[in-house]
Amino acid sequence: MKIALIGYGKMGKAIEEIALQRGHEILLKIDENNQADFTKENFSSADVAIEFTGPQSAFENIKKALQLNVPVVSGSTGWLEKADEINKICTGLNGTFLYASNFSVGVNIFFELNKKLAALMAPHPDYEVNIIEIHHTQKKDAPSGTAITIAEQVLENFPRKKSWVNRISDTTDELEILSERIDPAPGTHKVKYSSVIDDIEIIHTAHSRKGFASGALLAAEYIHDKKGIFTMKEVLSL
């Protein structure tokens, strides 16, 4: 595949390394210093764009790539209040889009365990639940997109919790997400159910960015010749 990288920070560089190892070509590297290269002519031969930028730029980057008729894989977080608009744009253009809050194969399996565990715990009122997420100090958003996904899955399957908050809470219907920023942690997510009798925890700890980069590339390989809106569930057949 010919890949356009939108965002060439740590994730972009990790994706580039793995892509080249798999025999793909990096056609373009777009960042804040060369926005003038984000053109129809330059993207005309791209098979797919992989977008990892920031909350302020992600929406416009995704929209522009879709308008250039390029399939887009995005892992940017902090912009999801506009996700429905992107989906409408993609559908209207008969385009291709895949978003994931986390591309790690392990995390996406963790998501499925999280939903199942929440459903199993829901009938047991003696248990309280909270979420802890730990990332490096350069992470720009809190809570992480992965933690929000985890929280929304808990809310769907654990009716006693009505909303999530990014702080300690004394309100029983609020689901706590506690965010810690510690270097050089690439990402740890913990869901803990506690009672006076015992605790039950599920934890995912990333050891490097390679799992995220590999999963993003796997997603790009999956969607580049398809039309529609996809998730990692389709990519991994979960």
Image (tube, grey):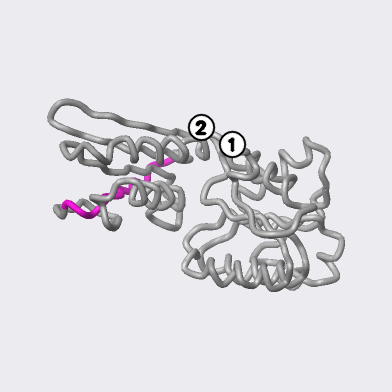
> In the image, which disc is placed on residue 70?
none
| Horizontal arrangement in the rendering, residue 83 relative to residue 45 (left or right) | left
Q: Quick one: 14 or 188, which is closer to the camera?
A: 188
Task: Tell me the kind of residue under disc 2.
Answer: His
Q: Is residue 177 magenta?
A: yes
* Disc 1 and disc 2 in contact, CB within 8 angstroms: yes
Give the image location of residue 143, x and y in percent.
38, 53
Q: Secondary structure at mark 1?
A: helix
Q: Quadrant of residue 51?
A: bottom right
Q: Quadrant of residue 59?
A: bottom right
Give the image location of residue 237, x and y in percent.
62, 38
| Residue that carries the numbered disc 2 in the rendered image | 207
| Horizontal arrangement in the rendering, residue 225 relative to residue 118 (left or right) | right
Task: Tell me the kind of residue under disc 1.
Answer: Gly
Give the image location of residue 224, x and y in percent.
77, 52
Measured along the vertical axis of the image, is residue 203 above or below residue 174?
above
Report crowding for label 2: few under 14, some 14 to 19, many 20 or more residues within 10 A (C-alpha).
Answer: few
User: What distance separates the C-alpha of mark 1 from that of mark 2?
Assistant: 8 Å
| Horizontal arrangement in the rendering, residue 27 relative to residue 135 (left or right) | right
Measured along the vertical axis of the image, is residue 230 above or below residue 38?
above
Measured along the vertical axis of the image, is residue 199 above or below residue 167?
above
Give the image location of residue 79, x and y in percent.
50, 65
